[in-house]
Each structure stands twice: as structure tokens, then as C-alpha cells.
Image: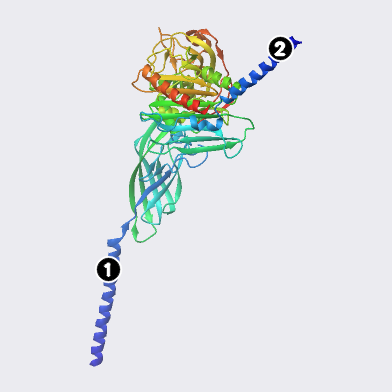
Amino acid sequence: MEREHFKLISKKSKGIQAKTLIIIFLSFLCIQFTYATNISVWPYEIRFNYENGSTNDATAILNDYGMPITIPEWKLNDTNEKCCYIAGQTNRKIQVRFDSNCDSMQLLINLNILSGNGIGSICNLFVANYKHLEWITLTLQGTIPNTVDIRNFSWEWEVYAIPFDDAFCAALSNNTTTHSYYTLLGSPQAPMAIPWTSVLDFACDWASGQSTNSSVLYYLSYNLYNSSGLDYDASQSHYDYISYPSQKFEFNLSDFLDEWNKADCQDMSMFLSILSSSIGASLNQTRRIQGSFSTKSIDPVGTTYSWGAITWNFHHVGWLSNIYDPCIRLNSSTPYIPINTDINSPYKADLYNSGIWSPQSAFILGQTDPYWGLPTEIR
Amino acid sequence: MILKYIISLSIALIYIFSIAAQDEKQMKKVQAKNIENIKIQEGEIGGSFLLFQENLFKPNKQATGQISQRWKRDATGSDLKMIEEETMDLGVSSGASCTQKWYRNKKKEKIEVDIILCPSESEINKTIEVFTKKMYSLQFKQTDIPVAGETTWVANNPDPELDSYSIMFLKANVFVRIYVNLKDQNINELKVIAHNLASTIETKILTEL
């Protein structure tokens, strides 16, 4: 009897124990199910220009004052620098690193252009064994537009992440980033082989929509004369003679851009060569026409001077086989800005009245100025 | 015999006078080491103008040779800082120079002051030639009566409505260029400001001669 009772109690207690274990197990599962967090992934930093050259990535640029630009160009809630591509460029890679609430995961990335004319997209890129904040290189699909411009766009980052950690559930993260980029006609060249953003802001705006060398040079010259707001003043210049210790000429581009007020013919022609070379157009030379000589009636850039004659010690022009002179208009009866104009006819015929007319050899800023026989540089 | 004596005496006197004249010329030079005594100091230009840039080239007081310094102010509230310094031994007397840029009104109004201490007569002539005929496309004409110094040049502006005015002058071995560009001022007001500045520098030069 006692044994039977003992067996009964023993069976009962085993039943209770089993029940308890099941409850604990179910509770654990329940807790697991209730408190498992969705994995979240978001872009933390993006590099557009991450290697030398621009074969695969963005073209190198400098900031407004010719100093190195911040890379990564984009950082969450911190940095958003412009980047720069050549018109029609097909090979484009970027580097990105994602932040997450999880350490390691598998990723399936879709990068879509939400708005604007973007630099490319990505469809279903699988990234195995991704570690949180690890840099990865992404190859973009699509091409850069064929015309010069400054473009804005936004990307939607659709990242489906599968965590290795059981505490997290697989989930889709959606994030948006916005960017701006310059589109250049070709590779930048001397004297602006690594363009300043302050120069590109003008060049890409003034040559916006253009896709040929001649039309880019036309609009740069035309807008430099008509839209710059600069005012002619031939009694000062940003092309300064530094006598000691280096015996050289400096085109003080920083001051010129900073002041953005007065300009002489040297400033105008040198800035045209800088604008052109910054976006890969082919005008990169300037040329001094030594005088002194008196002009016919001309209309210098800006509002201070109107049509009238001036006596100059010299004049300075942009040069690409012909004259590009964004500093003046000639021929008051049928005014024109000399753009791709022959140096003798009509340029000299419409400008020169009397005195000495002695064109010097053309040169590129950074080389020796043939008139002075001294080295030159941009500061 | 007497004639010979008179001729010899005359030659001797001419020689003595020429040496005295040379000495006098040498005495009337501002010494390169004193360049900082004649430059415009902070506060000497009124009207809220701030010195934003100064390039200074002067003898190195601690050793032989020259020293070149670039000073720059980043913004209105910041201090003028030396951003570049180079010392060199050029082996010859190299004079001194100070170029300054003063701004106000978000850099839309500017005063430029260049002061060059020339070490020799030939350097004086070269500096005059470069500044009045080669550096600027506008011609600079010598005035009949000097506005400042022994000789003055002013820009030969064809337009009286221009809002800038430029003047250069030579006093002893010191060549000075002043450029003034102000908004909403007529040419006469610009002239007054430039001439007052020229007068201030000339007074400083006189105290160093």
C-alpha cells in the first residue's frame, strides 16, 4: 500500500517536473520570440575618391582654397562634400561602410536613385560575412551624363540583413542619402589639374549642359564677361610679382575668389584658363600683348567703365590658337566678346589704335612667364 | 705753375664734394633693418579696416642673410598669424619690402600698401620701371608736383567715375604703392584717403633718414 502510494507520489512529482521543464522551455522560446530585435543597418561613411586616378572612382578635387577635401566625402550627420566625375564615365566604384546594431551579418544590397540624376545604382548585391563598420567596395551600374553640370541626387539604400546572432531577426533597412557631384567635360589639366571646388562651382554652372570643347569655351568666356559681376580695374592685379626670395609671379587665386570684386586683363584671362582646364576643356594658355598702345573704343567687363578708349602698358588674353578675351567687348556698332577670334583680323583691327603691338609667347600658369622670364604659380 | 695748382685744387675739391654728396645720399637711405618702423601698423588705418595679409622681407637680425615671412588673418575675429617663414643668405645686400592687404565690408573694400626699400640706385630705377610700366596694364604718369615724396606717379584712369585710386611715390630709397578701393565714395574722397596714407608713410620715412 505504502509502496503504491510512493509510486503515485513519484509519478505525480515526475509529471510536475516535466510540466515545469516544458513551461520553462516554452517561456524561453516565448521570451526569445517576444524580445528578438530586428537587425538594423545604415550607411555610415561613403568614399567616392578612394584611389589614385579616376579610372574606377571619382576625380580628385580640392576645397574652395586649394586644400585637400575631406575623405570620406560623406559621413552620417557630419560631412557631405561634393564629388566629381568625367562626362560619360562608365567605370564607377564607391566604398561604403555600414553601421548596425549587430556585429556580423549577410547583406543583400539594393541602391536606387530616388531623385535627381545620380551616379549609378546597384541591384541585389550579396555580401557574405559582413562585419559592422567594415569598408566594402561597390560597383555602380549606369553611366555619368554626357554634359557638364553640377547635379544633385538622392539614393535609397535598401539593405536586407541576415544576422549571425540569434538575438536578432533578419530585416530590411531603408535609408536615404543625398549627394552633389560635378560632371566635367574631360580630365582636368594644368594649371588646374586638381580642381578647386570654388572654381568648379563657376565652371560647371557657366558651361552647364555643354558637351563639346568649343561650346564649353564659348560659354565660359561669355559668362565670365556677362555674369561674373566682376568690375574692370587695370590699376591692380591678382597676378603679383614676388620679388624675394623666390623671384616669381603668383596668380593669387584665393584672394581673387575671396574678393570677387575687381579684375584686370591678367586676372580675367588667367581665370578663364583655370576655369577651362578645371573641367578638362583645352584652353590652358594665356598670352601677353606688350605695348604700350592706345585702344579704339572698348567696353571693359563690369559696370564702372562704358565704351571708351584706354592707353595700356600691355593687354593679356586667353589663348588657344586664337584669342579668348573675356575682359572686353569690341566694336561698339556691333559689339562682341572676342571668343576664338583671330589675333590680327578682326581682333587687332577692332582693338588697336596706335602704339606698340608686340604679342609675347603663350604660356601656362605654372610654367615660366616668357615676358618676365620668371616662374609662375597659383596660390 | 699757379694754373696747375688751381686745376689740381679744383679736381681735389670736385672729388671731395662728390664723395660728400655720395655720403649724403648714403645717409639719406632708410636702412633695410628698419622696414618695420615705416610699415603701416594695426590701427593706423581708421574706418574699420583690418590687416588681413602681410608679406615681409627683411634682414635677419639674429644672423647674416634675409628672412621672408607671410602673415595672414583667417577671419575678422581671428589674430594675424605667421603662416610661412623662410630664412636665406643671398650673399648681397637685398633691401627689404612689406606688402599689406587691408579689408573691410566683407572684403569688398580694400587698401593695398607696398613698401620697397631699395639697396642701390639701380634697384630704385628697376623698381620704378616695374611698378609704373610693367606690372599694371593701366599707365602711371608722373605728376608735375609731387603729392608725396620726391616723385609721385598716379594711375592714368580714363574714367573719373572709377571707385578706386592708385598712387606711387619715391622718398629717398623707399618706393611706395598705395591702392584704395572703396564703395560709395567719389574719386576725391578716395584721393584724400590715399594721400593721407602716403603722408603717414612719408613721415615715418623721414624719421628714419
Residue at figure coordinates x 53%, y 32% from the top left? B34
Q: Of A29 and A313, which appears nearest the observer?
A: A313
Disc 1 secondary structure class? helix
Decide if residue B136 is on the left or right side of residue B190.
Answer: right
Residue at figure coordinates x 38%, y 21% from the top left? A227
Decide if residue B94 is on the left or right side of residue B46.
Answer: right
Give how far across and how far down residue B36 sits, in percent: 50, 32
Give how far across and how far down residue A285 sits, in percent: 53, 23
- Give the quadrant of residue B185: top left
Give the amino acid type for the residue marked by disc 1 in the picture: Ser
- Give the quadrant of residue A113: top left
**Which label belongs to residue B84?**
none
In this rendering, the answer to whether B89 lies above or below A261 is below
Q: Which residue is mark 2?
A: B6
Residue placed furthest toward the right:
B1
Residue at figure coordinates x 33%, y 49% from the top left? A173
Disc 2 secondary structure class? helix
In this rendering, the answer to whether B46 lies above or below A355 is below
For the residues beneath circles 2 and 1, the answer to whether they share a chain is no
Give the amino acid type for the residue marked by disc 2 in the picture: Ile
